[in-house]
Image (cartoon, rainbow, N blue to C red):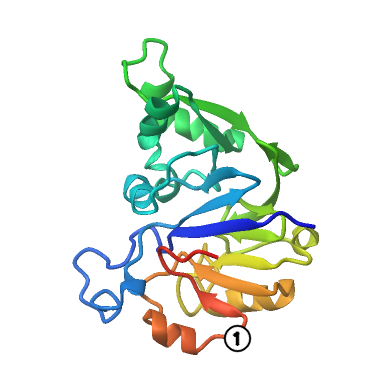
Amino acid sequence: MPAVIKMTFLGTGTSQGIPVIACNCAVCRSADVRDKRLRSSVLIEAAHRVLLIDAGPDFRQQLLRANVQRLDGILLTHEHKDHIAGLDDVRAFNASTGQPVDIYAEQRVMNALQREFQYVFTENKYPGAPEMNLHTIDEHPFTVEGVDITPIRGWHYKLPVLGFRIENLAYITDVNRVEEPEFEKLKDLDILTISTVRHGHHISHFSLEEALAFIAKVQPRRAYLTHLSHLLEAHSELQAMLPDNVQVAFDGLTV
Protein backbone atom coordinates (compact mmCIF):
# COMPACT_ATOMS: atom_id res chain seq x y z
CA MET A 1 0.00 0.00 0.00
CA PRO A 2 1.42 3.45 -0.92
CA ALA A 3 2.55 5.64 1.94
CA VAL A 4 0.29 8.49 3.00
CA ILE A 5 1.68 11.76 1.63
CA LYS A 6 0.76 15.30 2.62
CA MET A 7 1.43 18.09 0.13
CA THR A 8 1.18 21.77 1.03
CA PHE A 9 1.28 24.43 -1.67
CA LEU A 10 3.59 27.09 -0.27
CA GLY A 11 3.34 29.23 -3.41
CA THR A 12 1.32 28.94 -6.61
CA GLY A 13 2.33 32.02 -8.64
CA THR A 14 4.67 32.66 -11.53
CA SER A 15 8.05 34.36 -11.25
CA GLN A 16 6.31 37.70 -10.59
CA GLY A 17 3.77 36.36 -8.12
CA ILE A 18 0.28 37.86 -7.74
CA PRO A 19 -0.32 40.74 -7.32
CA VAL A 20 2.28 41.92 -9.79
CA ILE A 21 4.15 45.09 -8.87
CA ALA A 22 2.49 48.19 -10.36
CA CYS A 23 -0.36 46.19 -11.94
CA ASN A 24 -3.98 47.22 -11.42
CA CYS A 25 -5.72 44.43 -13.30
CA ALA A 26 -8.76 42.73 -11.78
CA VAL A 27 -6.78 39.68 -10.67
CA CYS A 28 -4.06 41.73 -8.98
CA ARG A 29 -6.75 43.83 -7.24
CA SER A 30 -8.79 40.77 -6.19
CA ALA A 31 -9.82 40.67 -2.52
CA ASP A 32 -9.93 36.86 -2.59
CA VAL A 33 -7.01 35.56 -0.52
CA ARG A 34 -6.69 32.67 -2.99
CA ASP A 35 -5.54 35.21 -5.60
CA LYS A 36 -2.54 36.24 -3.47
CA ARG A 37 0.18 34.01 -4.85
CA LEU A 38 3.83 33.70 -3.84
CA ARG A 39 6.35 32.03 -6.14
CA SER A 40 5.69 28.32 -6.75
CA SER A 41 6.90 25.76 -4.24
CA VAL A 42 5.46 22.75 -2.41
CA LEU A 43 6.21 20.98 0.85
CA ILE A 44 5.98 17.18 0.79
CA GLU A 45 5.63 15.13 3.97
CA ALA A 46 6.14 11.40 3.43
CA ALA A 47 7.47 8.54 5.56
CA HIS A 48 8.05 10.98 8.44
CA ARG A 49 10.30 13.07 6.21
CA VAL A 50 9.83 16.69 5.10
CA LEU A 51 10.95 17.63 1.59
CA LEU A 52 10.71 20.93 -0.25
CA ILE A 53 10.43 21.26 -4.02
CA ASP A 54 12.05 24.55 -5.06
CA ALA A 55 13.18 27.43 -2.86
CA GLY A 56 12.34 30.69 -4.54
CA PRO A 57 12.64 34.26 -3.24
CA ASP A 58 9.65 33.77 -0.90
CA PHE A 59 11.28 30.79 0.88
CA ARG A 60 11.51 32.49 4.30
CA GLN A 61 7.96 33.86 4.25
CA GLN A 62 6.54 30.56 3.03
CA LEU A 63 8.21 28.39 5.65
CA LEU A 64 7.30 30.78 8.46
CA ARG A 65 3.68 30.86 7.31
CA ALA A 66 3.52 27.05 7.18
CA ASN A 67 5.36 26.71 10.52
CA VAL A 68 7.97 24.36 9.02
CA GLN A 69 10.17 23.08 11.85
CA ARG A 70 12.40 20.64 9.98
CA LEU A 71 13.63 20.04 6.47
CA ASP A 72 15.14 16.77 5.27
CA GLY A 73 16.00 17.89 1.76
CA ILE A 74 15.30 20.33 -1.06
CA LEU A 75 14.61 19.13 -4.60
CA LEU A 76 15.24 21.66 -7.35
CA THR A 77 13.42 21.55 -10.67
CA HIS A 78 15.80 23.97 -12.41
CA GLU A 79 18.02 26.98 -11.81
CA HIS A 80 15.82 29.97 -12.57
CA LYS A 81 15.81 32.57 -9.80
CA ASP A 82 12.15 32.08 -8.88
CA HIS A 83 13.08 28.51 -7.95
CA ILE A 84 16.43 28.94 -6.14
CA ALA A 85 16.75 32.52 -4.89
CA GLY A 86 15.71 31.77 -1.30
CA LEU A 87 18.39 29.19 -0.56
CA ASP A 88 20.38 31.57 1.61
CA ASP A 89 17.71 31.05 4.27
CA VAL A 90 18.67 27.42 4.84
CA ARG A 91 20.91 29.03 7.46
CA ALA A 92 17.99 28.80 9.87
CA PHE A 93 17.97 25.00 9.59
CA ASN A 94 21.77 24.89 9.82
CA ALA A 95 21.48 26.71 13.14
CA SER A 96 18.67 24.56 14.53
CA THR A 97 20.18 21.19 13.55
CA GLY A 98 23.91 21.90 13.37
CA GLN A 99 23.90 20.17 9.97
CA PRO A 100 24.02 21.22 6.31
CA VAL A 101 20.80 21.05 4.31
CA ASP A 102 20.75 18.43 1.55
CA ILE A 103 20.10 19.82 -1.93
CA TYR A 104 19.17 17.52 -4.85
CA ALA A 105 19.48 18.77 -8.43
CA GLU A 106 21.07 18.12 -11.79
CA GLN A 107 24.73 18.98 -12.30
CA ARG A 108 23.88 22.00 -14.44
CA VAL A 109 21.74 23.35 -11.61
CA MET A 110 24.51 22.67 -9.09
CA ASN A 111 26.89 24.67 -11.27
CA ALA A 112 24.44 27.55 -11.21
CA LEU A 113 24.17 27.39 -7.40
CA GLN A 114 27.93 27.58 -7.10
CA ARG A 115 27.92 30.72 -9.25
CA GLU A 116 24.90 32.38 -7.66
CA PHE A 117 25.89 31.53 -4.08
CA GLN A 118 29.65 31.73 -4.48
CA TYR A 119 30.09 32.73 -0.84
CA VAL A 120 28.59 29.39 0.25
CA PHE A 121 31.22 27.33 -1.55
CA THR A 122 34.35 29.48 -1.30
CA GLU A 123 37.39 28.07 0.46
CA ASN A 124 37.53 30.89 3.03
CA LYS A 125 33.87 30.92 3.92
CA TYR A 126 32.33 33.73 5.96
CA PRO A 127 31.19 32.50 9.41
CA GLY A 128 27.43 31.97 9.38
CA ALA A 129 27.17 31.43 5.63
CA PRO A 130 24.68 28.75 4.61
CA GLU A 131 25.75 25.12 4.73
CA MET A 132 24.56 22.87 1.91
CA ASN A 133 25.30 19.29 0.88
CA LEU A 134 24.94 19.03 -2.89
CA HIS A 135 23.63 15.73 -4.29
CA THR A 136 23.70 15.42 -8.07
CA ILE A 137 20.74 13.63 -9.62
CA ASP A 138 19.68 12.82 -13.17
CA GLU A 139 16.68 11.11 -14.72
CA HIS A 140 17.16 7.93 -12.67
CA PRO A 141 15.16 7.24 -9.48
CA PHE A 142 16.83 8.11 -6.19
CA THR A 143 16.03 7.99 -2.48
CA VAL A 144 16.04 10.73 0.15
CA GLU A 145 15.89 9.53 3.74
CA GLY A 146 13.89 6.46 2.76
CA VAL A 147 11.57 8.35 0.36
CA ASP A 148 11.70 7.00 -3.21
CA ILE A 149 11.65 9.70 -5.89
CA THR A 150 11.34 9.33 -9.67
CA PRO A 151 12.46 12.34 -11.76
CA ILE A 152 10.35 13.27 -14.78
CA ARG A 153 12.05 15.04 -17.68
CA GLY A 154 10.33 18.08 -19.10
CA TRP A 155 11.36 21.03 -21.26
CA HIS A 156 11.08 24.71 -20.40
CA TYR A 157 11.55 25.97 -23.96
CA LYS A 158 15.12 24.66 -24.58
CA LEU A 159 16.01 24.24 -20.91
CA PRO A 160 15.71 20.70 -19.49
CA VAL A 161 13.89 20.66 -16.15
CA LEU A 162 12.82 17.93 -13.73
CA GLY A 163 9.48 17.13 -12.21
CA PHE A 164 9.21 14.57 -9.43
CA ARG A 165 6.99 11.60 -8.64
CA ILE A 166 6.75 10.46 -5.02
CA GLU A 167 4.52 7.41 -4.53
CA ASN A 168 1.27 8.25 -6.36
CA LEU A 169 1.86 12.02 -6.44
CA ALA A 170 3.65 13.94 -9.19
CA TYR A 171 4.69 17.60 -9.34
CA ILE A 172 5.71 19.17 -12.66
CA THR A 173 6.26 22.88 -13.21
CA ASP A 174 7.72 25.23 -15.82
CA VAL A 175 7.25 22.96 -18.82
CA ASN A 176 5.90 23.38 -22.30
CA ARG A 177 6.78 19.83 -23.36
CA VAL A 178 7.03 16.37 -21.81
CA GLU A 179 8.19 13.69 -24.20
CA GLU A 180 6.31 10.44 -24.73
CA PRO A 181 8.62 8.02 -22.82
CA GLU A 182 8.10 10.03 -19.61
CA PHE A 183 4.39 9.24 -19.54
CA GLU A 184 5.26 5.73 -18.36
CA LYS A 185 6.37 7.35 -15.10
CA LEU A 186 2.99 9.05 -14.71
CA LYS A 187 0.71 6.03 -14.76
CA ASP A 188 -1.83 5.43 -11.98
CA LEU A 189 -1.42 8.78 -10.21
CA ASP A 190 -3.67 9.86 -7.40
CA ILE A 191 -2.52 13.48 -7.67
CA LEU A 192 -0.86 15.39 -10.50
CA THR A 193 0.24 19.00 -10.10
CA ILE A 194 0.99 20.77 -13.37
CA SER A 195 1.81 24.39 -14.20
CA THR A 196 0.04 26.81 -16.51
CA VAL A 197 0.42 30.54 -16.99
CA ARG A 198 -2.24 31.80 -19.40
CA HIS A 199 -4.61 31.04 -22.26
CA GLY A 200 -2.97 30.59 -25.64
CA HIS A 201 0.51 29.59 -26.69
CA HIS A 202 3.52 30.44 -24.53
CA ILE A 203 7.09 29.75 -25.63
CA SER A 204 8.16 28.00 -22.41
CA HIS A 205 5.04 27.12 -20.39
CA PHE A 206 1.88 25.11 -20.90
CA SER A 207 -1.13 27.22 -21.71
CA LEU A 208 -4.28 26.38 -19.77
CA GLU A 209 -5.56 24.44 -22.75
CA GLU A 210 -2.31 22.47 -23.03
CA ALA A 211 -2.25 21.75 -19.29
CA LEU A 212 -5.79 20.38 -19.44
CA ALA A 213 -4.86 18.21 -22.43
CA PHE A 214 -1.84 16.93 -20.48
CA ILE A 215 -4.08 16.08 -17.51
CA ALA A 216 -6.53 14.29 -19.79
CA LYS A 217 -3.69 12.21 -21.23
CA VAL A 218 -2.19 11.28 -17.83
CA GLN A 219 -5.63 10.64 -16.27
CA PRO A 220 -4.80 11.23 -12.59
CA ARG A 221 -7.59 10.86 -10.06
CA ARG A 222 -7.12 14.53 -9.16
CA ALA A 223 -5.12 17.34 -10.70
CA TYR A 224 -4.04 20.76 -9.44
CA LEU A 225 -2.94 23.79 -11.45
CA THR A 226 -0.04 25.88 -10.18
CA HIS A 227 2.45 28.55 -11.33
CA LEU A 228 -0.49 30.75 -12.29
CA SER A 229 -0.17 34.28 -13.66
CA HIS A 230 -2.45 37.28 -13.51
CA LEU A 231 -3.21 36.69 -17.20
CA LEU A 232 -5.58 33.91 -16.15
CA GLU A 233 -8.93 34.56 -14.49
CA ALA A 234 -9.31 35.12 -10.77
CA HIS A 235 -9.48 31.94 -8.70
CA SER A 236 -13.24 31.48 -8.44
CA GLU A 237 -13.88 32.28 -12.10
CA LEU A 238 -11.07 30.00 -13.28
CA GLN A 239 -12.25 27.14 -11.08
CA ALA A 240 -15.74 27.32 -12.59
CA MET A 241 -14.23 26.68 -16.04
CA LEU A 242 -12.46 23.42 -15.12
CA PRO A 243 -13.43 19.73 -15.17
CA ASP A 244 -14.57 18.23 -11.87
CA ASN A 245 -11.25 16.46 -11.21
CA VAL A 246 -9.12 19.59 -11.79
CA GLN A 247 -8.66 22.22 -9.12
CA VAL A 248 -6.89 25.56 -9.01
CA ALA A 249 -4.25 25.31 -6.29
CA PHE A 250 -3.77 28.26 -3.94
CA ASP A 251 -1.19 29.22 -1.35
CA GLY A 252 -1.70 27.24 1.85
CA LEU A 253 -3.78 24.48 0.27
CA THR A 254 -2.98 21.08 1.77
CA VAL A 255 -3.88 17.81 0.08
Q: Position of residue 24 (x, y in %)?
A: 20, 76
| Quarter the N terminus occupies | bottom right
In-front residue for pair 205/41: 41
**Count of marks placed on residues:** 1
Q: Residues within 10 Å of mark 1 (few under 14, many from 20)?
A: few
Query: Is residue 252 found left or right of 50 in the rendered image?
Result: left
Q: Secondary structure at mark 1?
A: loop
* Residue 35 on image: x %, y %: 34, 73
The C terminus is located in which quarter?
bottom right
Which residue is more in the foreground, 229 or 179? 229
Q: Residue furthest top?
A: 124
Vertical comparison of 61 with 184: above or below: above
Q: Amino acid at mark 1?
A: Asp
Quadrant for residue 169, please give it.
Answer: bottom right
- Which residue is pictured at 61% across the width and 72% down the height? 223
Q: In the rendered view, tell whether residue 144 sits above or below residue 120.
A: below
49 in relation to 25, above or below: above
Q: Which quadrant of the structure image shows residue 143?
A: top right
Q: Quadrant of residue 18?
A: bottom left
What residue appears at the point 44 percent right and 22 percent down from the top-left corner? 98
Left or right relative to 85: residue 209: right
**Which residue is under mark 1?**
244
Question: Residue 10: where, in percent of width, then height?
Answer: 43, 57
Q: Nearer the viewer, residue 100 or 19?
A: 100
Question: 133 left or right of 86?
Answer: right
Residue 247 percent location from the top left of the image: 53, 77
Picture residue at 58% right of the left edge, 38% below the top: 105
Which residue is painted at 48% across and 89% down in the image? 240
